[in-house]
Amino acid sequence: MRRPQPVPSIEEITAHVEDWGITHVGVCSADILTETRTTLHERKAAGLHADMGFTYRNPDRSTDPAHAVDGAWSIIVAARPYLTATEPPIPGPDAGPHARVGKYAWVDHYAPLRAGLRSASKLIRRSGHRAVAFADDNSIVDRAVAHRAGLGWYGKNANLLIPGAGSFFVLGSIITTADYEWNERVAPDGCGSCTKCFEGCPTDAIIAPGVIDGNRCLSWVMQRPGSIPLEYRAAIHDRIYGCDDCQDVCPISVRLGQRNTVALSPEAQAWVDALELLDRPDDWIEDRYGRWYIANRDFDLVRRNALVVVGNVGDPTDMRVRATVERYRQHSNAVLVEHADWAARQLLARS
């Protein structure tokens, strides 16, 4: 039988995960996230979750680390930046209608985060303890444990803001039975009187400090099945997946985020050719954008978003634009027909 190894220190874990681009690490207890549980139930009852599943699906489970790992005692929380030092060029006007992708989805930033956490979990398991890595998983509310671990404070835009770094980070954690020293310091609120995110949200989805109405938040509006409400279609503008506006106007994230960046990957997909996407089959979309959250793997939802983009920014004199919209007006999917009809009206109004 192999003799258990000593439990790796948090300093050893921190140094280990640096190879995966993880820049911030903290530790907290694995006690139930009581305040977060209450908040999830209250906002779900008020309809602010807008039928979103994820950690809203079962708040009692996603706020109890012991549901994820039996006997959980500590949580190691990690943050990896996704802001790039440079950005891909914006397609020129002659390129046809292109759709914008949220920064966090240009590449799969969760893949290296998970890899680093899983590797660190193996080190802990060698000591005989249980340790399981989680990232972008409905088993645990990542933002809540990151806050408890002292990594940052809750900004008015509901993102976790890391002191000296901002909010352009993906979060993950290791839930373990190992006994690490817990953080007992809450990161001080650095937002002060700033309300830039309130003013910058295109749909007024921030209804109170740290409170988002999911019915209005464009990131969820573009992921939610069904028709996009008329009042939000123009606000989507050229977006097809994700919205960065409340972070892009945050002085802290804009100014301090540059201290924590990753290299721009050659595979980065910051822009999508909307007409090409509307011409392609499901397997083509899945191959290129399958890492996105697409409800029920229904790729017509991505086509729906592309039609909104074409209606908003397409050139009414471009024959390809007009032909694509007319083709979708004859589609068998009623939702696509509805959005193609809307796009046609938008193009006509600008012609």
Image (tube, rainbow, N blue to C red):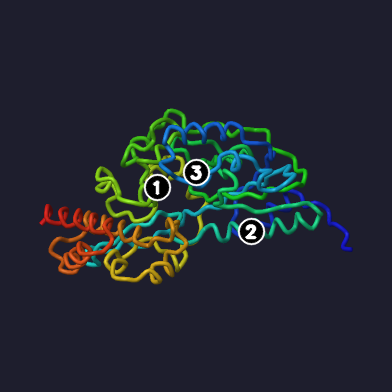
Image: 74 above or below 225: above
Distance (Cα) linking label 1 and label 2: 28 Å
User: What is the crowding at mark 3: few (fewer than 14 residues within 10 Å), some, or many (at least 20)?
Assistant: many
Residue at 25% x, 45% y: name it. Answer: 230
Using residue 205 as the reference point, say whether residue 65 is left or right of it: right
Residue 273 position within the rendered picture, expressed as x and y whole percent measured from the top left: 30, 65
> Mark 2: which secondary structure?
helix
Instruction: Identify which residue, 293 or 206, lies in the foreground.
Output: 293
Q: Earlier in the sequence, mark 3 or mark 1?
A: 3
Amino acid type at circle 3 is Gly
Instruction: Identify which residue, 119 or 285, lies in the foreground.
Output: 285
Distance (Cα) linking label 2 and label 3: 22 Å
Residue highlighted by disc 2: 116
Amino acid type at circle 2 is Gly
> Mark 1: which secondary structure?
helix
Residue at 68% x, 40% y: name it. Answer: 28
Image quarter in which the N terminus is found: bottom right
Using residue 268 as the reference point, say whether residue 149 is left or right of it: right
> Mark 3: which secondary structure?
loop
Residue 238 position within the rendered picture, expressed as x and y whole percent measured from the top left: 29, 54
Instruction: Identify which residue, 62 or 332, lies in the foreground.
Output: 332
Using residue 204 as the reference point, say whether residue 210 is left or right of it: right
